[in-house]
Amino acid sequence: MNTSTLIAIIIPAALVLVTLAAGLWLFTRRRNLQRQFGPEYDRTAEAAGSRMAADRELRARQQRHDTFEIKDLPAERRTEYAEEWRGVQEAFVDRPEGSVARADELVSRLMRERGYPADGFDGQLRDLSVEHGRTLEHYRAAHEVNVRSGEGETTTEELRGAMVHYRALFDDLLTNTNQGSR
């Protein structure tokens, strides 16, 4: 074989190998994002219009999250939060709307104490998605009921459901260890 024949074989083979390696790298990276973000990955892909756009968005969330000082709470603070949650639940019998609003406030306060910024609901969703993507649907559902409750448009059963949804995120935030430890 002469040199030009070898080059004609080696260059396309190298290009195929590089393309395969890049494809495998992208596939693995996407798979890791899907695993980490859970259902939030598909929701983001649908909202963004493509999986590549979702990948960019979720990586940006990871980078933002890495700048936070997320911390675990000491045992006594976790106990205090758990006791406060019990009080919110007990008050539900007499004042369901007020209890749902208090549950929202308690979850927001817990997020701030753990180190999440208080950037409003959409910002909280974005920031929580990195470590708590599997409980975000609970938070969305609870928040939606809380908003409608303020307008007097909810039933007691919807309010009860909101409490269950808030509880899912509350438990996740209260017991989840700091996965992003530096």
Image (cartoon, rainbow, N blue to C red):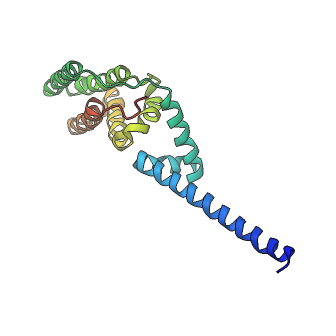
What residue is shown at x 33% (from left), y 41% (from top)? Answer: 135
Q: Work out which quarter of the rendered image holds the N terminus and state it.
A: bottom right
- Closest to the observer, 26 or 160: 26
Left or right of 49 in this view: 93: left
Work out whether 14 lies above or below 181. Answer: below
Residue 94 place in picture, x, y as percent:
14, 24
Left or right of 17 in this view: 132: left
What residue is shown at x 35% (from left), y 44% (from top)? Answer: 134
- Closest to the observer, 84 or 172: 172
Residue 43 in view in this figure: yes
Work out whether 8 lies above or below 165. Answer: below
Residue 157 place in picture, x, y as percent:
21, 39
Left or right of 20 in this view: 8: right
Residue 23 place in picture, x, y as percent:
60, 60
Residue 130 place in picture, x, y as percent:
43, 38
Residue 50 in view in this figure: no
What residue is shown at x 40% (from left), y 30% (from top)? Answer: 181
Q: In which quarter of the image is residue 117?
A: top left
- Closest to the observer, 124 or 3: 3
- Closest to the observer, 123 or 7: 7
Q: In which quarter of the image is residue 169?
A: top left
